[in-house]
Amino acid sequence: MAKRVLVVDDEKLIVKGIRFSLEQDGMEVDCAYDGEEALEAAKKKEYDVVLLDVMLPKLSGFEVCQQIREFSSMPIIMLTAKGDDMDKILGLEYGADDYITKPFNILEVKARIKAIMRRSGKNQNNDDTKTVSYGDLKIDCDNRRVYIAGKEVNLTAKEFDLLELLVFNPNKVYSREHLLNIVWGYDYPGDVRTVDVHIRRLREKIESNPSEPKYIHTKWGVGYFFQNQE
């Protein structure tokens, strides 16, 4: 089945170029030119990746990202024309998985999309279902789903990757740099604050008291680890 991508940008020439290039790679591409149109498209279909510009009419990319996160964990890559770090961090705060700064090379866009698709679908063809439980936390790795006390928690692709890595290496402390390299890749242009943002969001979703975490702990001056108390 062809991978589905939603491209959202109010610059029609950019959308046209991205669409043509992705369709050449056999992907199914839908387009939207404002925030409201993007949100409607995301509600109607589950996309493998959403390529979402920050500056949009009607609803900003940040608002669209935040609202998508209320009903889906589909991977989102933000596009920003600004070099300002705050835009990039804000995008991650709202639930984005990655960002690309304009102007960009289409080869970079395609590489990022394919990398996110590999990560988000890496367990789908595994016949050996892998499920682990710690207390009220249950992780279904086969279907990339997480439950707390039987209720499903909506994680982004990167949040799941982080949690999975930590859970399957309990009590091992990872530095922020190491986590960035493993989960985002050595060529990722962001910095370690990306890890901090995702760890905080993870705690808010799986910890009953994020300020006193039960699962994901900080080793001050070193990094983060998952504590196996069983």
Image: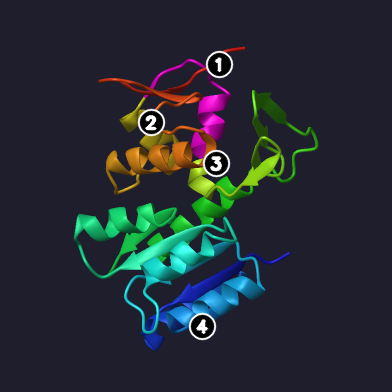
- Dot 4: element: helix
Give the number of the mark in front: 3 or 1.
1
Q: CA distance from mark 2 to mark 1?
A: 18 Å
Q: Please state which amino acid type lies under the numbered disc 4.
A: Glu
| In this picture, residue 186 sits left or right of residue 135 | left
Residue position for label 1? 228
Q: CA distance from mark 4 to mark 3?
A: 28 Å
Mark 2–mark 1 contact, CB under 8 Å?
A: no
Q: CA distance from mark 3 to mark 1?
A: 18 Å
Q: Residue 228, image x and y in percent?
A: 55, 16
Examine the rendering and report whether any part of residue 29 can be seen: no
Residue 161 magenta = yes
- Dot 2: element: loop
Residue toward you, 218 or 53: 218
Tag of residue 211 = 2
Residue position for label 4? 37
Mark 4–mark 3 contact, CB under 8 Å?
A: no
Q: Is residue 177 above or below residue 66?
A: above
N-terminal label among 2 and 1: 2
Residue position for label 3? 160
N-terminal label among 4 and 3: 4
